[in-house]
Image: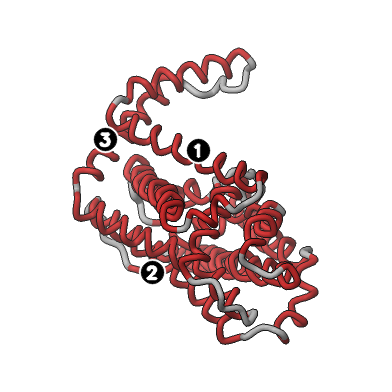
Amino acid sequence: MKNRAFNYLITITIIAITTYIITSSSEMGIIPTLLKITNLYYLCGAVVCMMLYWLSDAFIIKAIFELAKIRQSFFSFLKLTMIGQYYNLITPFSSGGQPAQVLTMTNDYKIPLGVATSITVNKFMVYHVVITTFPLLMLILKPYFIFGQNVLSKTLIFTGLGINILGILAIFTICYNSKIVEKIVLAILKILNKFKLAKKIQPAAVISHIKEYKTSLNTFLTNKKTLLLVSVYTLIQITVYFSVTYFIYLSLGLSQASLLDILAVQSLLYMAVNIVPTPGNAGASEGFFFLIFGIIFPSKILLYAIILWRLVIYYFNLAATGAFVFSDYVYKHLKINSQQGNPAK
């Protein structure tokens, strides 16, 4: 009875969070007006880019599963993608996706916890490297769009870029000198323990996880074929995600900026927004878009562009992934109830 009540609570929570975020937004009321002045053909292109983003993510997971010699259907990889996306969208720093994916792998696919964790770590590592390298490359190809920003925008962009570079250094430090990482983590734990903030975290368990990650990362990095394949898929994923803005640009009747121009500025926006700890980067995304994309969009339609962009990149994403998570949850529990009602199954 307690399990059933808990299941109902999770179901209601999923519906409530998704519905609240979508219906409480002031941006929703202006959508009918926006659609009248928007080229729907190009807007559909933005939606297709979002779908390709999910699809490429599923292929990334598939490649890493194959390296671990785990067989699953492609629908299983897509399911992990949608679950990860949904929980990333509703949690600060997009932090909920990976734990939700690990939980799904261990519960639904019976994959050992260490293996499930290593899959998400390997995927995150490649994504982190590519998403940081992307704006650095754009800095070389399109320097004007970086240095033409105002002081506040440049500060936010380079802060985000610096944090991501530090993250990459941390990842490779684990691979090549995990002792340094262990000392840093243990020092942080010691400080937290003084304030009674990490009493349940055992140093031995932390060191064990670091060693596990190191082994997993080394295995992944030595398999050049899989590493290259995952890197290419990740580059495609990031490119189609950033291309949503290009189709929004075209849908508003604009054509002066090239796709490469939009990709350059969008990569800067991502760096700036990524450091803000709000679910789905709500508020920060709109504000930073206004600051950073003012160099591309005419001021008179910049607000329309922001709303259309958020409509696709966040609300459509949230509604689709939320519906998927809810449907999967209902299906699993109907199946469980059916099997309990008929033991022969």
Mark closer to the observer (2, 3): 3
Name the colour scheme.
Answer: secondary structure
Who is closer to the viewer here, 283 or 165? Answer: 165
Label 2 environment density (alpha carbons within 10 Å; few <14, some 14–19, many ≥20): few
Label 1 environment density (alpha carbons within 10 Å; few <14, some 14–19, many ≥20): some
Check disc 2 and report its element: helix, strand or loop. Answer: helix
Question: Circle 2 sits on which residue?
Answer: 75
Mark closer to the observer (2, 1): 1
Q: Left or right: 183 with respect to 333?
A: left
Who is closer to the viewer here, 247 or 221? Answer: 247
**Real-space Cα separation, disc 1 to disc 3, in angstroms:** 27 Å
Check disc 3 and report its element: helix, strand or loop. Answer: helix
Locate residue 159: give its quadrant. Answer: top right
Identify the residue at image location x=43%, y=49%. 136
Above or below residue 49? Residue 140 is: above
The C terminus sits in image quarter = bottom left
